[in-house]
Amino acid sequence: MDEQAYPQLSPDLMLSIARERLARQLSFLDSLDTKLGTLFAASSGLLGILAAILALRPSEAGTGGWLALGFAGIAFATVACHAVRHLDPRPFNIGVDVDRLWEDHFRQEDHLLRWKTATDYLCYFDENRPKYLAKVKAVRWAVWAVTAESAALVAGLALVAVAA
């Protein structure tokens, strides 16, 4: 944007809002990473518990127990796929390029510099949005998969308990 595109009003309000908006988005991304990691750990534990029970009592498990283990394995694979895909480091736009800001600081008015910085924050938020929404979708899938895996564990335990 050129200097004519920015209003003569103070950019402070927009700068503050845009900075806070990006910071909140990045905080939500951290939260989603934590949730996805926790779901992955829980899923691994659930599968391990069911596998251990079936290994200790294979004769009581019957076909249903092994089907429950297979179903839990598919659910775990779903969680693992989403976790691996969305927990890898991705280049998110996290803020202003300080080197560019330093250079511009000596060539442009403070008023214009603050408007450009606010615009950068708004653009970074928009550029991060598709990655953020993909992470939200991955967490939703993982929640449903862990729920299904929990049901498979309960079914497997019930089958072994009834047979014992």
Image: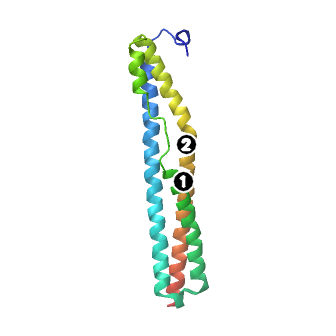
Which residue does the image show at 45% across and 39% down from the upper left? 26
Tell me which amino acid carries mark 2: Lys
- Residue 28: horizontal and vertical position, in percent? 45, 43
89 in relation to 122, above or below: below
- Residue 140: horizontal and vertical position, in percent? 55, 54
- Residue 89: horizontal and vertical position, in percent? 47, 47
Q: Secondary structure at mark 1?
A: helix
* Residue that mark 1 sits on: 85
Location of residue 96 (image quadrant): top left
Residue 48: tell me if it is visible: yes
> Is label 2 in contact with label 1 (beta carbons under 8 Å)?
no
Q: Quadrant of the N terminus?
A: top right
* Residue that mark 2 sits on: 131
Q: Residues within 10 Å of mark 2 (few under 14, many from 20)?
A: some
140 in relation to 122, above or below: below
Q: Which residue occupies the foreground of this view, 159 or 63?
A: 63
Q: Which residue occupies the foreground of this view, 127 or 144?
A: 127
127 in relation to 56, above or below: above
Which residue does the image show at 48% across and 52% down from the upper left? 87
